[in-house]
Image: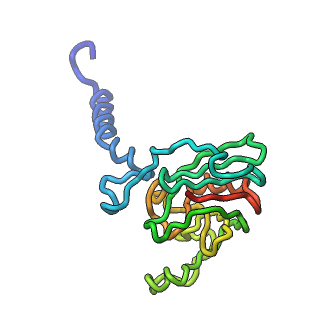
Amino acid sequence: MANGHLSRRAVLGGAVGGVGLAALPAFAQDGTTEFTQPASASVRRNISSFRMLRWEDYFDSTRNGLILADTTSRALHYWSEDQSIYRLYPTSVPLTEELTRRGLTSVVQKVVNPPWRPTPSMKKRNPDWPDVVEGGAPDNPLGSRALYLGWTYFRIHGTYDTRKIGRKSSNGCIGLYNENIEELFDMAKIGTQVRLI
């Protein structure tokens, strides 16, 4: 190139580089949970608005560990019983206020690859939905793990549809990325205290 002529290698390299640069936006979005258009005008991501909370403001003790699901900031906080472990995870939350349950409960069952069955009210609204989706299926709304709560039909669970995290997108449950629910599943136990706010 010192003599002012372009080599074949330089031309090909420049062409490949130009194509690569033109494709960057597509690659940057591939495999992410970002959208160019919102799914709905009423559905908004809120994944970056976590707020730090103190367990003392919501529980009397850390007996059996604590899970605090904050539907406002769409985040789940976990504290171990001895307070040596604290985790903060982004979540999905219920679509509407009518689907949201708040208060104190506990983990009553832990299930790996849980099967999903629509509740009677879901089935009434969506009669074409299947009666059951087997655990481990990629279209299973409960993902790879589920913590069943003391309230009928309410769960903290994973999801294979990562677009839901950070959104109002559930029928009442709290959803986490599968890798996050798997970590939480290993730390939580039957009797872990749970509060939804």
Kindly identify the residue that appears in the image at 59 percent across and 64 percent down.
143
Q: Quadrant of residue 102?
A: bottom right
Color scheme of the displayed model: rainbow
Q: Quadrant of residue 41?
A: bottom left
* Quadrant assignment for the C terminus: bottom right
Return the x and y of residue 172 as percentages of the image width and height.
52, 68
Q: Answer with left or right where residue 77 lies relative to residue 20.
A: right
Return the x and y of residue 191 as percentages of the image width and height.
76, 61
* Quadrant assignment for the N terminus: top left
Q: Quadrant of residue 3?
A: top left
The residue positioned farthest toward the left in the image shown: 4
In the depicted view, which residue is nearer to us: 71 or 116? 71
Q: Answer with left or right where residue 92 lies relative to residue 64.
A: left
In the depicted view, which residue is nearer to us: 112 or 55? 55
Return the x and y of residue 158 as percentages of the image width and height.
59, 61
Q: Answer with left or right where residue 113 lies relative to residue 27.
A: right
Return the x and y of residue 124 as percentages of the image width and height.
47, 86
Q: Number of numbered discs present? A: 0
Kindly identify the residue that appears in the image at 45 percent across and 45 percent down.
49
Q: Is residue 104 above or below residue 35?
A: below
Q: Is residue 33 above or below residue 168?
A: above
Kindly identify the residue that appears in the image at 58 percent across and 70 percent down.
137
The residue positioned farthest toward the top in the image shown: 2
